[in-house]
Image: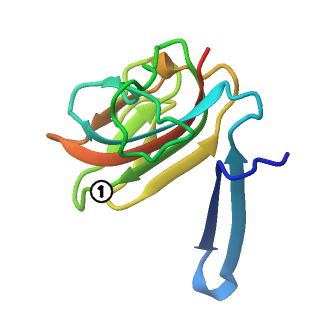
Amino acid sequence: MAYGDNTTTITATAKVLPAEIQKTLSATLTCGLAADNSEKWYYKLTKVSNSSTDLIAGNFLDNNVSATAASGLAAITTSDVVKFLFIKNLDTAKSIYFVLDAGTAASTADDGMEVGPGSFFAAKLTTGVTVARIHAISSTGDCDCLVAAIIDDV
């Protein structure tokens, strides 16, 4: 799929296994906006609290102007579908936990995912993951993170 100028590419390298048999794995994840303009970018410095709540809220970015334009942008609704999700934990001591099933985010959630201090999470998501399904919580107190997403404005 060709995405044009509205593309994101994430390249990761991981060293895995014990030193004696250590391997270096690398991969690239690329995705972008659909050609029909139904998908839009979301980007926000988000404060995750120690109470499970929606991770994504606010407005889309305008696909044709800079990210600093703040007026007249379309609002995100809980039924909008998240196609790509990137979370960067900016905290140096706290973790962020999130779920994709509308359940309560917690460090003990069976289907929860953790973004540790200074770490990131990135993935293409299936069509069933709406804004309302993505909940997050911090390990303690407030935790700042950057959230970027490609969302289908349904």
Q: On the rendered structure, is 113 left or right of 145? A: right
- The one of 126 and 17 positioned closer to us in this rendering: 126
Q: Residue at x 45, y 47 (%)?
A: 66
Q: Quadrant of the N terminus?
A: top right
Q: Residue at x 75, y 51 (%)?
A: 4
Q: On the rendered structure, is 103 left or right of 25? A: left
Residue 103 location, x and y as percent?
Answer: 43, 18
Residue 111 location, x and y as percent?
Answer: 51, 30
Quadrant housing residue 140: top left
Q: On the rendered structure, is 31 left or right of 67? A: right
Find disc 1 in the rendering and name its residue: 90
- The one of 31 and 89 positioned closer to us in this rendering: 31
Quadrant housing residue 28: bottom right
Q: Quadrant of the C terminus?
A: top right
Q: Residue at x 24, y 52 (%)?
A: 94
Residue 99 location, x and y as percent?
Answer: 47, 29
Q: Is residue 29 above or below residue 61?
A: below
Q: Residue at x 25, y 56 (%)?
A: 91
Colour setup of the view? rainbow
Name the residue at the right extreme. Answer: 1
- The one of 52 and 31 positioned closer to us in this rendering: 31
Q: Badge 1 local density, few (<14 within 10 Å), some, or many (20+)?
A: some
Residue type at the position of mark 1: Leu
SS class of the residue under badge 1?
A: loop
How many numbered tags mark residues here?
1
Residue 79 location, x and y as percent?
Answer: 54, 12
